[in-house]
Amino acid sequence: MTPQATAGAPGIAGAPAFRHELYPYEGDASFLQGALSFIEDALAADETVLVAVGEDKQDMLREALDATGTDRQVSFVDTGALGRNPGRLIPAWQDWIAKTAGGGLPVRGISESPWGTATPAERGELRYHEWLLNLTFANSPAWWLLCPYDVTTVEPAALESARRCHPYRLTDALHGDNPDFSDQPFSFEELSAACDPQQTLVYGAGALAAVRAAVTACATQHGLQGARLKELLVAATEVAANSVRHGGGSGRLRIWVDGDVLICEFHDSGHIRDPLAGRSRPTPDQFGGRGLWLVHQLCDLVQIRSTAESGTTVRLSTALR
């Protein structure tokens, strides 16, 4: 059965520019049914489609589309090329939407996050990413994003968060409003506790060399070297410099290893007010705002927690293997 569009779809008077839709499904057959009907509707309306799912789902969709002769009208993106950092996903969608919608073409997308292979820390950032999509594309060119969630495998916390941050929902082959949607501020989980042993350094103006030395000592002790170490040092320097410039002039660095991940955590008294800080590609004429963007490109995971009361904590994770 082909899902039926509702008056909330992009392109209809009074509809939002961005339609963010949840698709809860059970198993591969259900995924394929919903995704194919979504794609077929888009192609019938002469809309461009981009699919960002795991390799197994890509293979299923490619085979099904090839059988109908429509495979060349759908683009696939390998989300693995972006790494495991969810902070890189929004700019990737922004680039594609700007390129496609800029040519006047209606756009649809399908995006399924790698819940099954993500770490607990990554899953927390994936939940935040889904919430940020509504903010990011509130004033974008009109487009429609379908987010499949396998209810048989995705953890309950992720499903609950998804129900709250998707204004629309595909259920029983019908597109409609999501009664569980909430536009309340995102509620972060507490960062995981630091592991022992850990190194601590209080830094201020003129102490960036000490920050780099501390990170280098711990990293090399655990086998991180070469280009990966250089990237981490650039990221660590950027965050520490932000503390000096915007976080009260000083900060505290803690470094530890959790399993096969090296973690550098920076804390200062500043407050980052922009929830999208570091998640939008800087423009050539932009003044400032490039540091956190660069940090997201260089680290495997970036977690930011910031309030006016407690200050800012930026946690950088780099895989040792």
Image: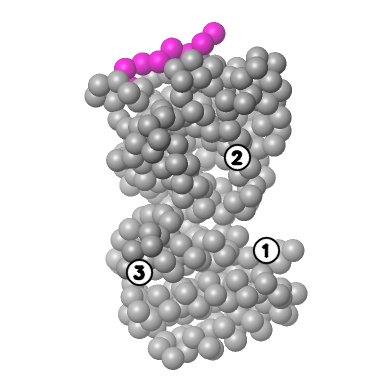
Residue holding disc 1? 319
Q: Residue at x 30, y 40 (%)?
A: 139
* Residue kind at label 1, given as amino acid type: Ala
Residue 78 position within the rendered picture, expressed as x and y whole percent measured from the top left: 63, 42
Q: Quadrant of the N terminus?
A: top right
What is the number of the mark on residue 77? Answer: 2
For this view, does 141 lie left or right of residue 228?
left
Whether residue 303 is in magenta: the answer is no
For the record, the magenta segment spans: 1-8
- Identify the residue at horizontal 41%, vertical 28% (top origin): 106
Q: Position of residue 123 (x, y in %)?
A: 56, 48
Of residues 211 and 124, the one nearer the viewer is: 211
Image vertical order of residue 298 relative to residue 82, above or below: below
Dot 1 or dot 3: first in sequence order is 3
Corner quadrant of residue 301: bottom right
Quadrant in the picture for residue 52: top right
Nearer to me, 281 or 258: 281
Measured in 3D between alpha carbons, the distance from the residue under mark 1 to the one under mark 2, in whole angstroms, is 24 Å
Task: Tell me whether the residue at label 1 lies in contact with that at label 2, contact meaning CB atoms closer than 8 angstroms.
Answer: no
Instruction: Choose the circle earlier in sequence order: 1 or 2.
Output: 2
Report if residue 6 lies within the magenta region: yes
Where disc 3 sits, the SS reads loop
Residue under pointer 3: 288
